[in-house]
Image (spheres, rainbow, N blue to C red):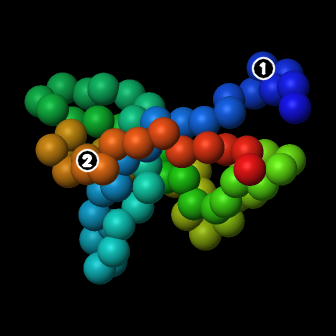
Amino acid sequence: MKSNGQRRSVEVFDTPSGLGGSHTVEVVEDLRNNKVKVRVWYGRATAAGWEAWKDWDGYRFETDRANLTNKRSMPLFK
């Protein structure tokens, strides 16, 4: 399948959600003092591309880089 310039995967981490679980996040900006701005990836990869689940997908917040664990590549297409 041709990507037409679309990203096929994204580098993600786990970080505590503050709600008893974790979020899967991508670092979108490095800030000062070991802080980063992250984007939550919440949904699933499909043959047509990422299917966003609107509750959290795309939410952005700041966190300490030390809170990022389990670095991996997550496919956006199935």
Kind of residue sitting beneath label 1: Gly
Q: Position of residue 11 (x, y in %)?
A: 46, 36
**Numbered disc 1: secondary structure:** loop
> Visible in this render: residue 54?
no
Residue farthest along the top direction in this orientation: 5
Q: Position of residue 58 (x, y in %)?
A: 58, 50
Q: Which quarter of the figure is the N terminus placed in?
A: top right
Q: Check the image and report above or below for 7 versus 14.
A: above
Q: Residues within 10 Å of mark 1 (few under 14, many from 20)?
A: few
Q: Which residue is mark 2?
A: 68
- The reply to whether dot 2 and dot 1 touch (C-beta < 8 Å) is no
Q: Quadrant of residue 21?
A: bottom left
Q: In the structure shown, which secondary structural element does the residue marked by tag 2 occupy?
A: loop
Q: Is residue 65 left or right of residue 75?
A: left
For the point 61% across and 43% down, which residue is it? Answer: 75
Where 75 falls versus 8 (above or below)? below
Q: Is residue 41 left or right of residue 19?
A: right
Residue at the spot 18% in from the left edge and 26% down from the top edge: 32
Q: Residue furthest bottom?
A: 20
In percent of width and height, residue 61 lies at 38, 49
- The residue under label 1 is 5
> Which of the 4 quarters of the picture holds residue 29?
top left
Q: Is residue 42 visible?
A: yes
